[in-house]
Structures are given as C-alpha cells and as structure tokens.
C-alpha cells in the first residue's frame, strides 16, 4: 500500500514527532530525519538535513556527485555516524547526537542494496539470499522456506543453485534485492542499484523494481543522480545539493515549479535572464526581443531569471527571437542548441530545422527563479521560519493517489 505523502523539510525534534503522531500520519515505518549534520575533514557532507518519509512510500534522493546523498543513506543504515541531529524509524530513536544514542546497523531492521550489489562470489544464489537470516541464527528449514518464497516473488527461483558469475546484470540485481528483502526490513535503502545496467535493461529493471516494492509495501529510499529516474520511480523525492535539501515534493510538484536555480540546473532546465513587466494578463519577462508570460512573482522593471524545460519551447512561432547554433537527432526527436540574447538554450522538437536558421520561439511554463541561497545556509537555520507552514500542510494532508494507481512521468506520461 502506498503510504501517506507529507511534505517533509522541517525542524523541531520531539515536538514534530508528537504533531505527526497526533495527526495520524506517522506509523511504525515512518522515517524522520532531523537536522542531520556530517563532516569529513573540511568537507561538510550534510548541512542540517531534515526529512519525513511515510510508511510504504518510495522516496528518492536525487543530487549530483558529492551532494551527500550516499552519506545520508549510510547514516540511516548506521555505517556513518553524524555529528549532529537525530534519526527515527517509526517511534524508535536509532540515532540522537544529544542523547548519545546510536543503534548498530544490524539492529535497525534496515535492508540495503549497494550500487555494486556486492554478491558473495564464493556462495551460490541460495546462500547469498539466505546470508542475513543465517547470521541472525534462524533455523535451516525456516531459512529454506523463506528463500523459496522470496525467490518466487522476485521470479528468480530457477537461479537459486547458480553462482553469481553465471548471472546477467539484471539477475544479479534481483538477487541483491532478494537478499535485502528476506530479512523483512521495515525500511529498504537502495544506493543507485541500476547504474551498472545498460540503458534498455535499466528502464525495464526500474519498472519491475517499482512494481515489486509497491506490491510488498516496504518503505523505500532510493538514491540516484539521474533526475529522470527519480521522476519516474518515486512517490516523492528530495533534491540534495551540497549537503542541503533544496526541494521536497511529488515528481509533478518539483518539476512543475522549478524556482530554485540549482535544482533547475540539475534537472537540465534552461535559464534565461530578462526584465519583468506587469500587464493585464499578468507578469511577463522580456526575453530575446519578445515577451513571455511567467509563473511566480517579482517586482516589475527588475532583472529576473526564469527557468523552463527544453520540451516547453516551440520552434517556428512566438515572439522570442533565436538562432539555431547546432542540432542533433536523438531518435524520436531533435535537440537544438539555440542562441537567445547571447545565451544558449536547448529545445526539443520532432520538427526539422536547419543549423544557422533564425527562428521565432514560443516558451511556455516559465518559472521565475528565487534568489540564490548562500552555501553556508543550512536547513536547520531556515527551518524555524518555515515550521508553522509545514505543520499546517501536514495536518491538511489528504491522499493523492490510491494503491495501484499508475505513476505519471511529467515528460513521458504513464510509466506503468
């Protein structure tokens, strides 16, 4: 069952837990991360990161290399010790820097699928899957029964007596997931588990894995650097950049309101600078000799930056002037590099246009970018001002979807 969808950047420790519990939106598998801080030497890997992840939810953490996403995952698992903050799995405190609580990994009830899958080469598939149960001291007959059951669910029963080196990449991935799920974890952590697969197999594996996790109902956190993967895979996602949570929301909430410049760049949106104009139809921005209606608010007559997707640029119509600098054929569409007022933007279209051509552009769904936040700002420092707003959103929460309802990718449509 897909869990509750609660917007999750906040601060406040026990008071927040109590508010969530009283609202009826916290359960045994809810994960609450409060103001987590982690440093490696001079590098601040996590800067007051806070999240709430609901029971049964598939939650992605997306960010570029070095953003701190794997560090956050390892802190949840217990393989890294933060310098500050707290972690709750349901109502159990597994880490609290002030109280000196740090539950070891083997007692957190967390399943883990690493990027490399890390199958034991000297063990057959059957023994790889059973490893977690063996170290817990479970009796052999019970282990065999559970191995057969999870192998049937993941459709790998015919592989149980194979060696890891005999398996394809996709088969190894399923074995790694089976090994993580067989201990019946309350939380499943996945660290870029599809990065070793070729593109076609990766797409198939993504659909299969999302379907399986939803059917099992296990709360899952999925780390990736691929924004398309996060959009198509997740119930909700968080964008982590330089150790700070920049955005949290459903795929559509994040994609359709790209008002953070760093998030916009990560998601490969175009960014253009122009001057704001207020008219009867609303707020406009002057770009490339034309005017474009924008989403958001800004004082008129000011310089402003706007973001927009390459899919929201229509060539051959509109008032914005541009020049096609280059183009490439990508199968189902062409991608154009277009100069607008001295800045290169990307546009995607199924129509063919010549290199060097002057074109009119119509740009839709432009979003005014907010100010760039200083790097030393932390989620903890911003949290106090936002706490009341987040609490109101939590208490007004209503389900966005029902179990079995298809997920919709903002660009690609229905993904299953």
Image (cartoon, rainbow, N blue to C red):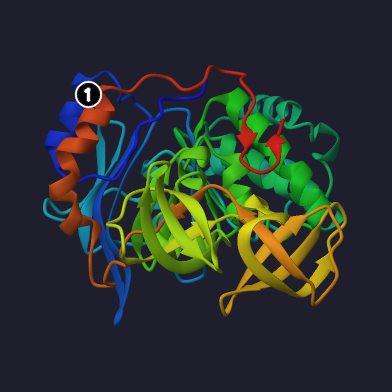
Tally of marks: 1
Q: Quadrant of residue 84?
A: bottom left
Quick check: 84 above or below 150? Answer: below
Q: Quadrant of residue 140?
A: top right
What x and y, as percent, mark residue 30? 35, 32
Q: Quadrant of residue 180?
A: top right
Q: Depth check: give the residue in front, 363 or 382.
A: 363
The quarter of the picture where the C terminus appears is: top right
How would you rate the neighbour count of disc 1 (Cα within 10 Å): few for under 14, some for 14-19, many for 20 or more? some
Q: Residue at x 23, y 62 (%)?
A: 378
Is residue 201 left or right of 245 when viewed as pictured? Answer: right
Residue 241 can be seen in this image: yes
Is residue 171 left or right of 294 when viewed as pictured? Answer: right
What x and y, as percent, mark residue 35? 22, 54
Q: Depth check: give the residue in front, 292 or 134.
A: 292
What x and y, as percent, mark residue 208? 72, 36
What x and y, as percent, mark residue 329? 86, 64
Q: Depth check: give the residue in front, 323 or 376.
A: 323
Q: Depth check: give the residue in front, 125 or 323.
A: 323
Q: Residue at x 29, y 72 (%)?
A: 375
Q: Residue at x 16, y 28 (%)?
A: 18
Extreme residue toward the bottom, this view? 42
Quick check: 139 above or below 409? Answer: above
Residue 76 can be seen in this image: no
Say what secondary structure mark 1 lies in: helix
Identify the residue position indicated by label 1 in the image.
21
Q: Residue at x 40, y 25 (%)?
A: 4
Quick check: 379 above or below 415? Answer: below
């Amino acid at each position: 069952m897909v869990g509750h969808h609660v917007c999750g950047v906040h601060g406040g420790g026990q008071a927040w837990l109590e508010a969530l519990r009283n609202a009826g939106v916290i359960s045994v598998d809810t994960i609450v991360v409060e103001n987590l801080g982690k440093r490696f030497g001079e590098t601040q890997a996590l800067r007051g990161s806070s999240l709430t992840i609901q029971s049964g939810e598939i939650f992605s953490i997306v960010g570029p290399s070095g953003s701190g996403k794997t560090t956050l995952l390892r802190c949840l698992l217990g393989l890294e010790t933060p310098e500050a903050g707290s972690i709750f799995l349901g109502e159990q405190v597994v880490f609290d820097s002030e109280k000196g609580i740090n539950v070891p990994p083997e007692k957190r009830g967390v399943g883990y699928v690493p990027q490399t899958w890390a199958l034991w080469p000297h063990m057959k598939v059957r023994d790889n899957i059973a490893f977690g149960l063996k170290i817990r001291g479970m009796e052999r007959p019970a282990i065999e029964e559970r191995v057969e059951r999870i192998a049937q669910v993941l459709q790998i029963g015919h592989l149980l007596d194979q060696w890891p080196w005999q398996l394809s990449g996709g088969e190894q991935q399923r074995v790694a997931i089976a090994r993580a799920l067989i201990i019946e974890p309350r939380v499943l952590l996945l660290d870029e588990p599809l990065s070793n697969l070729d593109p076609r197999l990766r797409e198939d594996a993504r659909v299969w894995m999302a379907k399986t996790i939803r059917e099992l109902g296990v709360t899952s956190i999925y780390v990736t650097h691929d924004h398309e993967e996060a959009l198509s895979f997740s119930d909700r996602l968080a964008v982590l950049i330089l150790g700070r949570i920049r955005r949290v929301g459903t795929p559509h909430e994040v994609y359709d309101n790209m008002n953070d410049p760093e998030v916009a760049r990560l998601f490969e949106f175009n960014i253009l600078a122009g001057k704001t104009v207020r008219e009867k139809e609303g707020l406009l921005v002057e770009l490339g000799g034309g005017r474009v209606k924008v989403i958001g608010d800004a004082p008129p007559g000011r310089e402003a930056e706007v973001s927009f997707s390459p899919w929201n640029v229509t060539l051959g119509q509109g008032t914005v002037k541009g020049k096609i600098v280059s183009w490439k054929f990508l199968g189902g569409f062409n991608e154009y590099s277009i100069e607008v007022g001295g800045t290169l933007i990307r546009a995607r279209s199924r129509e063919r246009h010549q290199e060097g051509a002057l074109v009119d552009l119509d740009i839709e769904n432009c979003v005014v970018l907010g100010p760039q936040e200083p790097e030393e700002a932390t989620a903890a420092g911003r949290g106090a001002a936002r706490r009341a707003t987040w609490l109101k959103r939590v208490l007004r929460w209503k389900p966005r979807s029902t179990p079995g309802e298809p997920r919709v990718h903002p660009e690609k449509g229905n993904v299953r």
